[in-house]
Image (tube, grey):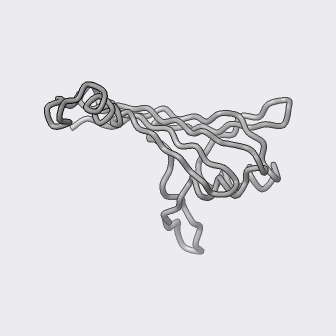
Amino acid sequence: MADYWATCRSNYFHVVCRKSFDLWAWRCGLVVWPRDDGRVAITTEEQRGWPVERGVDHPEDIDWEDFDLFDELAGHLQEGEVAVLLESGSEKARVIGGYAVAVTRGKKAVQISLDDIYAKAAEKFSVPVHRIGRAEY
C-alpha cells in the first residue's frame, strides 16, 4: 500500500487580526507566508493534505479534535476577501486527485474537484458517465 502525498497552498488574502490568525494557523499546523502588502497565504509543512484534526493540550498528554479548516478560516478573513485553497496529491500513480475550495468571511464556500471531469465529459460528449473509465488503479 502506498502513501498519499499532497501539496497544499492558498492564494494571498487579508485577515482581520494578524496575531490571532498566526496563532490559529500554528494550532492547525499551517505555515503562514506573509507579503509586504499585509496579505498572507497558507500552506502545510508535511505532504499530508489540509488538516482535519489538531492537537489539544491536556495536563497529561495531547488529545486530538476534528475541525473544519475552511469554516474557521472564513472567520479570519477581512470582509470582501476570498481565500482559495488548493490541494493536489497522489498515491504513487494509482490515484491522482486534487480539489480547490474558495471561502469568504460570510462562510460561503464553493468547491471543485478533479473528479468533476467525469460528469462534465459525460455531459459534453453525450455519453453515460459509467462508460468513462476512471484514471485510477
Q: Nearer the viewer, residue 16 or 1?
A: 16
Q: Along the horizontal axis of the image, is 130 left or right of 37?
A: left
Q: Where residue 2 sits in the image (x, y, percent)?
A: 25, 35
Q: Nearer the viewer, residue 74 or 51?
A: 74
Q: Is 67 situated above or below 40? A: below
Residue at (35% x, 36% y) in the render? 116
Q: Nearer the viewer, residue 68 or 25?
A: 68
Residue farthest to the right, as pictured:
37
Q: Where residue 89 sits in the image (x, y, percent)?
A: 40, 32
Q: Quadrant of residue 34?
A: top right
Q: Quadrant of residue 117?
A: top left
Residue at (73% x, 44% y) in the render? 81
Q: Along the horizontal axis of the image, is 15 left or right of 55?
A: right
Q: Along the horizontal axis of the image, is 3 left or right of 34?
A: left
Q: Quarter of the image for the C terminus: give it.
A: top left
Residue at (74% x, 52% y) in the render? 21
Q: Along the horizontal axis of the image, is 94 left or right of 27?
A: left
Q: Where residue 131 sits in the image (x, y, percent)?
A: 14, 32
Q: Quadrant of residue 83?
A: top right
Q: Where residue 18 sits in the image (x, y, percent)?
A: 81, 49
Residue farthest to the bottom, as pictured:
59
Q: How many marks?
A: 0
Q: Is 53 situated above or below 114? A: below
Q: Quarter of the image for the N terminus: give it.
A: top left
Residue farthest to the front, as pictured:
126
Q: Is 61 situated above or below 33? A: below
